[in-house]
Image: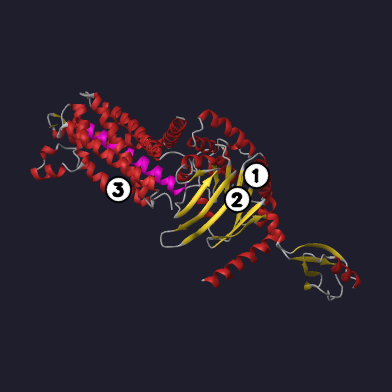
Amino acid sequence: MKHMSSNMIALKTIWIKECTRFLRIWIQTLVPPAITMTLYFIIFGSIVGERIGTMSGVGYMEFIVPGLIMMSVITNSYSNVASSFFSAKFQRNIEEMLVSPVPTGAIILGYVGGGVARAMIVAVIVTLVSFLFVDIQIAHFGYVVLTVILTSTLFALGGLLNGVFGKTFDDISIVPTFVLTPLTYLGGVFYSVSLLPDIWQKVSLVNPILYMVNGFRYGFLGQSDVGIATAMAVLIGFNVIFFAGAYYLLEKGIGIRS
Amino acid sequence: MKALEIKNLKKVYRGGFEALKGIDLTVEEGDFYALLGPNGAGKSTTIGIISSLVNKTGGSVKVFGYDLDTQLGDLKRQIGLVPQEFNFNQFETVRQIVVNQAGYYGVPRKLAHERSEKYLSQLGLWDKRDEPARSLSGGMKRRLMIARALLHEPRLLILDEPTAGVDIELRRSMWEYLTKINNEGITIILTTHYLEEAETLCRNIGIIDAGQIIENTSIKRLLAQLSKETFVLDLEQDHPQPKIEGFAHRWKDNNTLEVEVDKNAGLNKVFEQLSAAGVNVLSMRNKANRLEELFVSMVEKGREKGDRSA
């Protein structure tokens, strides 16, 4: 019981430290997504979008809003944890945690909690920005919240794995550039996969981000390219696998202990 | 009670380097213990294993009876670690660093803030509490690491070369502080290159070389092993250079004489002969730190033994 409350204090400490970090450097962490997304809304939504007309029965602007919010959630949850954890390794202040009795689960949850908090704040900012361009209705608020939490948790865990394996700062930027960005762009942010030829529709189904974007779009618009139950199952499944992977690596000390 | 009990501790790094070859070490509660050894001897590996930053290959470690393998959480709670390199987040403030560290040990935030005032004040850092750590001087950063290690009030404080690169004045004030907290009951283990530091502060000493403990005894007993000491005598200028019968000696220049004196022989006969020759002695000092001489000879002996058995 005593250790339980001690572990909770440790978890809270890591979470507060992580939130303090991204709030301290808000100009690098919270402002850029607002600017980038405003540009997306102006260019793809207003200028190009007006010529496109409708997509899956809704205005193009309305169609891309959930995808763009999800894109910010993915990028921010991932990069928050990847860069914070790698910096802690690089500056060796990860040792502050390793010498203390913080359980592995608390380290993971603390870091992931920081990434989720940043992703949530960014999601709110981007949603507010989207209100300037389109009058959007939320069909299933519960799914919106659930998808954003599960997605940000998943990518925060992904960022943690990247931080664990990363040996240089380059290693931290390789995954977002060469894996995350292509998967996000090809995950149905800007188009409905039903527009693709059959073969590419099938290929798209192996992209996990497709399920997140569509789960989120279902929450907003009440419609999706994939079943909502499948989307949730994929998200939960990946979360379990990533958490187990991160737990195993940290427990074994891989990448952090000699 | 034993503060630290290490048995047959082994560490082989990836690549096959054998850093520890099965060391045994015991430190009693309340002790001020020095772990000495040349670079690469295995000091930091030993400390790394005790503080669980390095995975051991074999053997056992107990801290205040808590086993590293089966009671890791309780073992960690007993230890405060001051590492050799600065390992805090340079962008966090002094207070954030110490309060967060206490949080990792489960110290409630309010209590951690109270203790931060106590320890940062004791170490002369309270005025700097809201400054980012990167703005501190080297000496202040070292003191910050000591404060950070004390915030969860450990029973064993381990310091890995705490005064490396620290100026003499600050070193002395750190010595005073460490002596004070040792007198208050905290067991201290330190590694150092400054043998004077070990001689001044510590009661017991372990000498480690090439992954093996070659001596584990009290400083008193260790110094008793010294059979000879070399003294440097500063003499008045313009004098002849008399021969000093019965003592190995060397004239460094016209007014500096080095004399090797057997521990039981005393210096009277040296002075008698110098007086008889009309030489006036102005001052006298030990040529080198006594412990240093002994340390060097022990390490050399250990290596000769190792060469023979290899």
Q: What type is the residue that disc 2 sits on? A: Leu
Element class at badge 2: strand
- Which residue is under mark 1? B178
Q: Position of residue A56 (x, y in %)?
A: 12, 31
Q: Earlier in the sequence, mark 1 or mark 2?
A: 1
Marks 3 and 1 on same chain? no
**Magenta stretch, overall SS:** helix
Q: Label 1 near label 3: C-beta < 8 Å?
A: no
**Residue A113 found in image quarter:** top left
Distance between the Cα atoms at labels 3 and 1?
A: 47 Å
As drawn, is A9 to the left or to the right of A147? right
Element class at badge 3: helix
**Highlighted magenta segment, given as a residue range:** A66-92
- Which residue is under mark 3? A175
Q: Nearer the viewer, residue B104 or A185?
A: B104
Q: Nearer the viewer, residue B148 or A21?
A: B148
Element class at badge 1: helix
Q: Nearer the viewer, residue B75 or A158?
A: B75
Q: Position of residue B285 (x, y in %)?
A: 78, 61
Q: What type is the residue that disc 1 sits on? A: Leu
Q: Nearer the viewer, residue B62 or B298?
A: B62
- How busy is the neighbourhood of tag 1: few (under 14 within 10 Å), some, or many (20 plus)? some
**Which subunit holds the residue at mark 1?**
B
**Which subunit holds the residue at mark 2?**
B
Distance between the Cα atoms at labels 1 and 2?
A: 10 Å
Question: Looking at the rendered structure, which numbered label has been put on residue B190?
Answer: 2
Q: What type is the residue that disc 3 sits on? A: Val
Distance between the Cα atoms at labels 3 and 2?
A: 43 Å
**Which subunit holds the residue at mark 3?**
A
